């Protein structure tokens, strides 16, 4: 099974767990596949992880979808290899790493941020606060995180729409009183030396849901749900 297939399966399970955990209040979801994951160590126990949408010749080619899921739904799709395709569409996430081996399976903690950019420059931004965990059985890493200070900004053509680079859009306004909160599960495969040495271009997938009011803590534990289902 390829990394992309394994990522898709794991993210599908994660999305199901997210939906069952908070199906009453979700206003936005986003999922990205085949991001380029990189890690730069600043010491033996600290460093910075980044995941960026890319269109590499012969390498990773990212894809994604961002959807509004309330009473005014819509979806913005980003095709395989969408970065650099003549639009402003992009995605990036950073999250620090601080080692903490107190509990089995927990690698450490991290804080960071994300930015999802649509075809004409509108953005969804937010803070990431979470725990890095390792599933030794399946040999993958995931970030079990909450999102805070999530904001939508109509930076582009002032059209009040978050536009996909492939097709689709949804209205930016009318979601409620920002900032919003949410939860995220980010998965990286094939990184046995994760957080012990620098690396680049590890295929990385993530999925997240955003809520209109405090409640993201109810979504924590998603990584454990993914790992538990994969072991069955």
Image (spheres, rainbow, N blue to C red):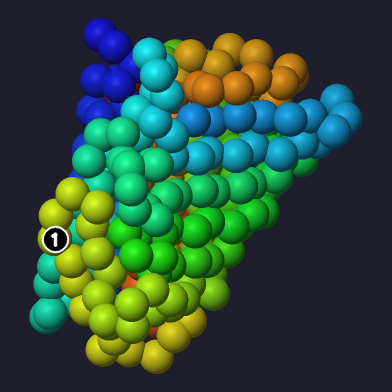
Q: Left or right: where does residue 144 sit relative to residue 83? A: right
* Residue 73 position in % (x across, y down): 12, 72
Counting from the top left corner in percent of width and height, residue 109 is at 68, 45
Is residue 8 in view from this perspective? Answer: yes
Find residue 153 and report its horizontal and vertical position in percent: 43, 77
Q: Position of residue 189 (x, y in %)?
A: 45, 20
- The residue located at (64%, 54%) in the rendering is 112
- State whether residue 25 appears in this view: no
Q: Which residue is mark 1?
A: 168
Nearest the viewer among 173 and 138 is 173
Instruction: Using the image, determine if residue 28 lies above or below residue 85.
Output: below
Q: Residue at x 64, y 37 (%)?
A: 49
- The answer to which quarter of the image holds residue 59 is top left
- Across the whole image, how many numbered discs are drawn on residues? 1
Callout 1: SS: loop
Residue placed at 53% from the left, 39% from the top? 51
Q: Tell me which corner region of the image, top left, top right, bottom left or bottom right, holds residue 160.
A: bottom left
At x 51%, y 48%, the residue is: 92
Q: Tell me if mark 1 has few (under 14), some (14-19) or many (20+) residues whose alpha carbon lies within 10 angstroms of its own.
A: some
Specify the farthest residue to the top.
1
Relative to residue 227, is residue 177 depicted above or below?
A: below
Q: Image quadrant for the C terminus?
A: top left
In the rendered image, the vertical position of residue 115 relative to residue 153, given as above or below: above
Q: Is residue 231 placed above or below 185 in the rendered structure?
A: above
The answer to which of 86 and 206 lies nearer the viewer is 86
Between 224 and 85, the one lying in front of the other is 85
């Amino acid at each position: 099974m390829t990394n992309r297939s394994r990522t898709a399966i794991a993210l599908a399970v994660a999305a199901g767990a997210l939906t069952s955990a908070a199906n009453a209040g979700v206003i936005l979801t986003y999922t990205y596949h085949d991001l380029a994951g990189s890690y730069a160590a600043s010491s033996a126990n600290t460093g910075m992880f980044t995941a960026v949408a890319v269109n590499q010749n012969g390498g990773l080619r990212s894809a994604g979808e961002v959807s509004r899921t309330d009473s005014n739904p819509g979806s913005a799709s980003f095709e395989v290899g969408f970065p650099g395709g003549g639009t402003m569409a992009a995605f990036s996430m950073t999250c620090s790493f601080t080692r903490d081996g107190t509990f089995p399976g927990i690698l450490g903690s991290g804080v960071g941020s994300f930015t999802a950019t649509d075809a004409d420059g509108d953005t969804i931004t937010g803070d990431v606060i979470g725990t890095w965990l390792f599933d030794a059985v399946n040999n993958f890493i995931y970030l079990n995180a909450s999102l805070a200070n999530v904001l939508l900004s109509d930076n582009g053509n002032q059209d009040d729409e978050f536009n996909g680079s492939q097709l689709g859009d949804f209205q930016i306004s009318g979601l409620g009183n920002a900032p919003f909160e949410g939860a995220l599960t980010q998965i990286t495969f094939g990184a046995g030396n994760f957080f012990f040495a620098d690396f680049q271009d590890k295929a990385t997938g993530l999925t997240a849901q955003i809520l209109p009011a405090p409640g993201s803590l109810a979504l924590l534990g998603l990584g454990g749900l993914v790992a538990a289902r994969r072991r069955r």
